[in-house]
Amino acid sequence: MARSAIGRLFAGLRCLPVGNTQLQTQCSRWSSERTGVEASMFSHKPRDFSLPNPSWGEEMKRLYKHYNLQSEEAAGQGEDGEWWTRLPSYNRSLKYATGGVYLSKMIQSKARLFTRNIRDPGAAFEYVLFFRNDKQRCLCIFQAGHLLEGPPGHVHGGAIATMIDTVTGTHASLLSAPVMTANLNINYRSPIPLGSTVLIESTLDKEEGKKKFISCKVSSTDGSKLHTEATALFVSISVSHLLRG
Ligand SMILES: CCCCCCCCCCCC(=O)SCCNC(=O)CCNC(=O)[C@H](O)C(C)(C)COP(=O)(O)OP(=O)(O)OC[C@H]1O[C@@H](n2cnc3c(N)ncnc32)[C@H](O)[C@@H]1OP(=O)(O)O
Protein backbone atom coordinates (compact mmCIF):
# COMPACT_ATOMS: atom_id res chain seq x y z
CA MET A 1 0.00 0.00 0.00
CA ALA A 2 2.68 2.45 1.08
CA ARG A 3 4.87 1.41 -1.84
CA SER A 4 2.26 2.03 -4.47
CA ALA A 5 1.44 5.40 -2.95
CA ILE A 6 5.09 6.40 -3.02
CA GLY A 7 5.46 5.05 -6.54
CA ARG A 8 2.64 7.31 -7.71
CA LEU A 9 4.26 10.15 -5.86
CA PHE A 10 7.54 9.78 -7.74
CA ALA A 11 5.59 9.82 -10.97
CA GLY A 12 4.05 13.01 -9.61
CA LEU A 13 7.43 14.55 -8.90
CA ARG A 14 8.23 14.31 -12.59
CA CYS A 15 4.99 16.17 -13.21
CA LEU A 16 5.89 19.38 -11.46
CA PRO A 17 3.92 22.22 -13.08
CA VAL A 18 6.62 23.71 -15.23
CA GLY A 19 4.26 25.28 -17.72
CA ASN A 20 5.72 23.19 -20.53
CA THR A 21 3.57 21.18 -22.87
CA GLN A 22 6.22 18.50 -23.29
CA LEU A 23 6.21 17.65 -19.61
CA GLN A 24 2.47 18.02 -19.47
CA THR A 25 2.19 15.40 -22.19
CA GLN A 26 4.51 13.11 -20.27
CA CYS A 27 2.37 13.49 -17.20
CA SER A 28 -1.06 13.73 -18.72
CA ARG A 29 -1.93 10.05 -18.56
CA TRP A 30 -1.23 9.88 -14.87
CA SER A 31 -2.92 13.14 -13.99
CA SER A 32 -5.98 12.61 -16.13
CA GLU A 33 -6.51 9.25 -14.48
CA ARG A 34 -6.83 11.09 -11.24
CA THR A 35 -8.37 14.47 -11.89
CA GLY A 36 -8.13 15.45 -15.53
CA VAL A 37 -6.50 18.70 -14.52
CA GLU A 38 -2.74 18.78 -13.98
CA ALA A 39 -2.87 21.80 -11.72
CA SER A 40 -5.00 19.90 -9.28
CA MET A 41 -2.05 17.68 -8.40
CA PHE A 42 -1.12 20.36 -5.94
CA SER A 43 -3.21 20.75 -2.87
CA HIS A 44 -2.11 24.29 -2.15
CA LYS A 45 0.17 26.86 -3.65
CA PRO A 46 3.75 26.15 -2.66
CA ARG A 47 6.52 28.73 -2.53
CA ASP A 48 8.61 28.41 -5.67
CA PHE A 49 12.16 29.26 -4.61
CA SER A 50 13.41 29.57 -8.18
CA LEU A 51 11.50 32.80 -8.80
CA PRO A 52 13.34 36.14 -8.50
CA ASN A 53 13.63 37.73 -5.07
CA PRO A 54 15.18 41.04 -3.96
CA SER A 55 18.49 39.38 -3.08
CA TRP A 56 19.21 38.56 -6.72
CA GLY A 57 22.02 40.61 -8.18
CA GLU A 58 21.97 42.21 -11.62
CA GLU A 59 23.75 39.30 -13.32
CA MET A 60 21.39 36.72 -11.81
CA LYS A 61 18.37 38.75 -12.93
CA ARG A 62 19.80 39.35 -16.40
CA LEU A 63 20.47 35.65 -17.02
CA TYR A 64 17.12 34.64 -15.56
CA LYS A 65 15.39 36.99 -17.97
CA HIS A 66 17.51 35.74 -20.85
CA TYR A 67 16.63 32.06 -20.41
CA ASN A 68 13.07 32.72 -19.35
CA LEU A 69 12.57 34.71 -22.53
CA GLN A 70 13.85 31.79 -24.58
CA SER A 71 11.24 29.54 -23.01
CA GLU A 72 8.42 32.05 -23.41
CA GLU A 73 9.38 32.90 -26.97
CA ALA A 74 9.48 29.25 -27.88
CA ALA A 75 6.18 28.42 -26.24
CA GLY A 76 4.30 28.75 -29.49
CA GLN A 77 6.89 26.88 -31.57
CA GLY A 78 6.90 23.22 -32.57
CA GLU A 79 8.70 20.42 -30.75
CA ASP A 80 11.79 20.80 -32.99
CA GLY A 81 12.94 24.22 -31.79
CA GLU A 82 15.46 24.58 -29.00
CA TRP A 83 14.17 26.17 -25.85
CA TRP A 84 14.68 26.09 -22.13
CA THR A 85 12.09 25.42 -19.50
CA ARG A 86 12.41 26.72 -15.98
CA LEU A 87 11.99 24.15 -13.24
CA PRO A 88 10.10 25.18 -10.14
CA SER A 89 11.88 24.45 -6.87
CA TYR A 90 10.30 23.70 -3.52
CA ASN A 91 11.71 23.07 -0.07
CA ARG A 92 9.96 19.74 -0.07
CA SER A 93 8.66 18.52 -3.42
CA LEU A 94 7.14 15.52 -1.69
CA LYS A 95 4.67 17.77 0.08
CA TYR A 96 3.24 19.27 -3.09
CA ALA A 97 2.55 16.23 -5.23
CA THR A 98 -0.71 14.29 -5.06
CA GLY A 99 -0.89 12.39 -1.82
CA GLY A 100 2.22 14.19 -0.70
CA VAL A 101 0.75 16.08 2.21
CA TYR A 102 -0.11 12.78 3.83
CA LEU A 103 3.18 11.12 2.89
CA SER A 104 5.27 14.09 3.95
CA LYS A 105 3.80 13.71 7.43
CA MET A 106 4.62 10.01 7.44
CA ILE A 107 8.19 10.28 6.18
CA GLN A 108 10.51 12.49 8.20
CA SER A 109 7.99 15.29 8.50
CA LYS A 110 10.59 17.91 9.36
CA ALA A 111 12.80 17.06 6.38
CA ARG A 112 13.57 19.88 3.94
CA LEU A 113 15.66 20.04 0.79
CA PHE A 114 19.18 20.97 1.88
CA THR A 115 19.61 23.76 -0.67
CA ARG A 116 16.23 25.38 0.10
CA ASN A 117 16.17 25.41 3.89
CA ILE A 118 17.69 28.80 4.68
CA ARG A 119 14.97 31.39 4.94
CA ASP A 120 17.07 34.55 4.60
CA PRO A 121 16.98 35.34 0.85
CA GLY A 122 20.44 35.56 -0.68
CA ALA A 123 22.24 34.11 2.34
CA ALA A 124 23.08 30.75 0.82
CA PHE A 125 21.94 28.94 -2.32
CA GLU A 126 20.10 31.18 -4.76
CA TYR A 127 19.57 29.30 -7.97
CA VAL A 128 17.24 28.64 -10.83
CA LEU A 129 17.39 25.63 -13.11
CA PHE A 130 16.36 25.33 -16.73
CA PHE A 131 16.34 22.22 -18.88
CA ARG A 132 16.56 22.04 -22.66
CA ASN A 133 13.61 20.62 -24.49
CA ASP A 134 15.45 17.44 -25.51
CA LYS A 135 16.55 16.96 -21.87
CA GLN A 136 20.15 16.44 -22.97
CA ARG A 137 21.26 19.54 -21.09
CA CYS A 138 20.40 21.46 -17.95
CA LEU A 139 21.55 24.91 -17.01
CA CYS A 140 21.59 26.48 -13.58
CA ILE A 141 22.19 30.10 -12.66
CA PHE A 142 23.69 30.10 -9.17
CA GLN A 143 24.38 33.03 -6.87
CA ALA A 144 26.48 32.00 -3.87
CA GLY A 145 25.56 33.74 -0.60
CA HIS A 146 27.74 34.73 2.33
CA LEU A 147 26.86 31.66 4.44
CA LEU A 148 28.66 29.44 1.94
CA GLU A 149 32.17 30.59 2.73
CA GLY A 150 35.05 28.13 2.56
CA PRO A 151 38.39 29.81 1.86
CA PRO A 152 38.08 33.47 2.95
CA GLY A 153 35.88 35.33 0.49
CA HIS A 154 35.25 32.25 -1.63
CA VAL A 155 32.73 29.45 -1.89
CA HIS A 156 33.18 26.26 0.11
CA GLY A 157 34.05 23.20 -1.99
CA GLY A 158 31.26 21.25 -0.31
CA ALA A 159 28.73 23.89 -1.31
CA ILE A 160 29.97 23.66 -4.90
CA ALA A 161 29.67 19.87 -4.75
CA THR A 162 26.15 20.25 -3.37
CA MET A 163 25.14 22.42 -6.29
CA ILE A 164 26.73 20.05 -8.81
CA ASP A 165 24.90 17.11 -7.21
CA THR A 166 21.67 19.10 -7.24
CA VAL A 167 21.93 20.09 -10.90
CA THR A 168 23.07 16.71 -12.21
CA GLY A 169 20.67 14.89 -9.85
CA THR A 170 17.74 16.97 -11.00
CA HIS A 171 18.82 16.36 -14.60
CA ALA A 172 18.90 12.58 -14.01
CA SER A 173 15.55 12.77 -12.21
CA LEU A 174 13.99 14.43 -15.22
CA LEU A 175 15.08 11.46 -17.30
CA SER A 176 13.88 8.82 -14.85
CA ALA A 177 12.99 9.41 -11.23
CA PRO A 178 13.84 8.11 -8.72
CA VAL A 179 17.64 8.04 -8.97
CA MET A 180 20.51 8.22 -6.53
CA THR A 181 24.03 9.52 -6.95
CA ALA A 182 26.39 6.55 -7.15
CA ASN A 183 29.54 8.45 -8.04
CA LEU A 184 30.61 12.08 -8.18
CA ASN A 185 34.08 13.19 -9.34
CA ILE A 186 35.02 16.84 -9.02
CA ASN A 187 38.00 18.86 -10.20
CA TYR A 188 38.19 22.33 -8.69
CA ARG A 189 40.01 24.57 -11.19
CA SER A 190 39.58 28.10 -9.86
CA PRO A 191 37.86 29.52 -6.75
CA ILE A 192 34.41 31.09 -6.91
CA PRO A 193 34.12 34.48 -5.18
CA LEU A 194 31.34 34.67 -2.58
CA GLY A 195 28.39 36.68 -3.85
CA SER A 196 29.18 36.01 -7.48
CA THR A 197 26.86 34.44 -10.02
CA VAL A 198 28.05 31.46 -12.03
CA LEU A 199 26.61 29.07 -14.60
CA ILE A 200 26.38 25.35 -13.90
CA GLU A 201 25.78 23.30 -17.02
CA SER A 202 25.10 19.58 -17.10
CA THR A 203 25.16 17.32 -20.14
CA LEU A 204 23.87 13.78 -20.49
CA ASP A 205 26.84 11.80 -21.81
CA LYS A 206 25.27 8.36 -22.03
CA GLU A 207 22.64 6.04 -20.65
CA GLU A 208 23.33 2.36 -20.01
CA GLY A 209 20.36 0.51 -18.61
CA LYS A 210 19.62 2.04 -15.25
CA LYS A 211 22.83 4.12 -15.27
CA LYS A 212 23.03 7.74 -16.36
CA PHE A 213 26.40 9.37 -16.92
CA ILE A 214 26.27 13.14 -16.67
CA SER A 215 29.09 15.67 -16.92
CA CYS A 216 29.01 19.13 -15.48
CA LYS A 217 30.96 22.34 -15.52
CA VAL A 218 30.79 25.50 -13.47
CA SER A 219 31.98 28.64 -15.21
CA SER A 220 31.82 32.40 -15.03
CA THR A 221 28.76 33.86 -16.70
CA ASP A 222 30.78 35.26 -19.62
CA GLY A 223 32.37 31.84 -20.11
CA SER A 224 35.91 33.16 -19.71
CA LYS A 225 36.74 31.23 -16.54
CA LEU A 226 36.25 27.56 -15.76
CA HIS A 227 35.72 27.11 -12.02
CA THR A 228 34.86 23.45 -11.66
CA GLU A 229 34.42 20.28 -13.73
CA ALA A 230 32.66 17.12 -12.67
CA THR A 231 31.33 13.79 -13.82
CA ALA A 232 28.50 11.98 -12.10
CA LEU A 233 26.84 8.59 -12.25
CA PHE A 234 23.21 8.19 -11.27
CA VAL A 235 21.51 4.85 -10.84
CA SER A 236 17.77 4.41 -11.14
CA ILE A 237 16.37 2.78 -8.06
CA SER A 238 13.13 1.14 -7.17
CA VAL A 239 10.92 2.77 -4.59
CA SER A 240 11.57 -0.18 -2.29
CA HIS A 241 15.28 0.78 -2.28
CA LEU A 242 14.31 3.99 -0.51
CA LEU A 243 11.96 2.23 1.87
CA ARG A 244 14.73 -0.20 2.85
CA GLY A 245 16.86 2.77 3.84
C1 LIG B 1 12.29 16.74 -10.04
C2 LIG B 1 12.72 16.33 -8.65
C3 LIG B 1 13.87 17.10 -8.22
C4 LIG B 1 14.59 16.55 -7.01
C5 LIG B 1 15.86 17.28 -6.87
C6 LIG B 1 16.80 16.59 -5.99
C7 LIG B 1 18.21 16.83 -6.39
C8 LIG B 1 19.17 16.35 -5.39
C9 LIG B 1 19.89 15.12 -5.86
C10 LIG B 1 20.66 14.55 -4.75
C11 LIG B 1 21.00 13.12 -5.04
C12 LIG B 1 21.76 12.53 -3.90
O1 LIG B 1 22.48 13.20 -3.24
S1 LIG B 1 21.53 10.91 -3.58
C13 LIG B 1 22.36 10.68 -2.03
C14 LIG B 1 23.76 10.17 -2.16
N1 LIG B 1 23.78 8.81 -2.75
C15 LIG B 1 23.56 7.75 -1.99
O2 LIG B 1 23.35 7.79 -0.76
C16 LIG B 1 23.56 6.42 -2.72
C17 LIG B 1 24.02 5.27 -1.87
N2 LIG B 1 24.23 4.08 -2.75
C18 LIG B 1 23.18 3.32 -3.09
O3 LIG B 1 22.05 3.46 -2.56
C19 LIG B 1 23.44 2.22 -4.06
O4 LIG B 1 24.80 1.86 -4.02
C20 LIG B 1 23.06 2.65 -5.52
C21 LIG B 1 21.58 3.04 -5.60
C22 LIG B 1 23.90 3.83 -6.01
C23 LIG B 1 23.32 1.45 -6.44
O5 LIG B 1 22.74 0.30 -5.88
P1 LIG B 1 21.87 -0.73 -6.74
O6 LIG B 1 20.61 -0.09 -7.18
O7 LIG B 1 21.75 -1.99 -5.92
O8 LIG B 1 22.67 -0.95 -8.03
P2 LIG B 1 23.89 -1.95 -8.30
O9 LIG B 1 23.30 -3.23 -8.81
O10 LIG B 1 24.84 -2.01 -7.16
O11 LIG B 1 24.62 -1.18 -9.50
C24 LIG B 1 23.96 -0.88 -10.71
C25 LIG B 1 25.02 -0.53 -11.72
O12 LIG B 1 25.67 0.68 -11.30
C26 LIG B 1 27.07 0.44 -11.10
N3 LIG B 1 27.51 1.19 -9.93
C27 LIG B 1 26.92 1.27 -8.73
N4 LIG B 1 27.58 2.07 -7.92
C28 LIG B 1 28.65 2.53 -8.61
C29 LIG B 1 29.73 3.41 -8.31
N5 LIG B 1 29.84 4.00 -7.12
N6 LIG B 1 30.62 3.65 -9.27
C30 LIG B 1 30.52 3.08 -10.49
N7 LIG B 1 29.52 2.24 -10.83
C31 LIG B 1 28.60 1.96 -9.91
C32 LIG B 1 27.18 -1.07 -10.89
O13 LIG B 1 28.46 -1.55 -11.26
C33 LIG B 1 26.13 -1.59 -11.82
O14 LIG B 1 26.60 -1.55 -13.15
P3 LIG B 1 26.20 -2.70 -14.22
O15 LIG B 1 26.70 -3.98 -13.64
O16 LIG B 1 24.68 -2.65 -14.29
O17 LIG B 1 26.87 -2.26 -15.47
Image: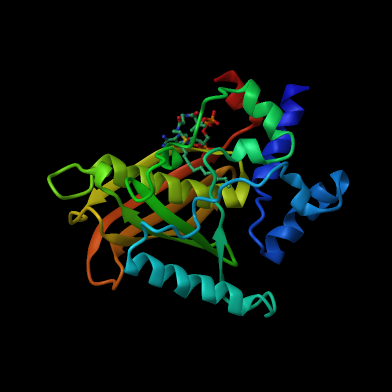
Quarter the C terminus occupies: top right
**In which image quadrant can residue 57 be found?**
bottom left
170 relative position to 20: left or right? left
**Residue 180: image location, x then y, percent:** 51, 37
* Number of numbered markers: 0
Task: Residue at the far front: name it.
Answer: 54
124 relative position to 11: left or right? left
**In which image quadrant can residue 97 be found?**
top right
235 relative position to 125: left or right? right
**Residue 17: image location, x then y, percent:** 67, 55
Quarter the N terminus occupies: top right
Q: Which residue is nearer to you in this view: 86 or 165?
A: 86
Q: Which residue is nearer to you in this view: 186 or 124?
A: 124
**Residue 227: image location, x then y, percent:** 24, 58
Residue at image position (50%, 58%) is 51
171 relative position to 36: left or right? left
Q: Is residue 118 above or below residue 130?
A: above
Residue 204 visible, this orientation? no
Q: Is residue 153 above or below residue 67?
A: above
Residue at image position (56%, 37%) is 92
Task: Residue at the far left: name it.
Answer: 152
Q: Is residue 209 above or below residue 26?
A: above
Describe the colour scheme in one phrase.
Answer: rainbow
Residue 80 visible, this orientation? yes
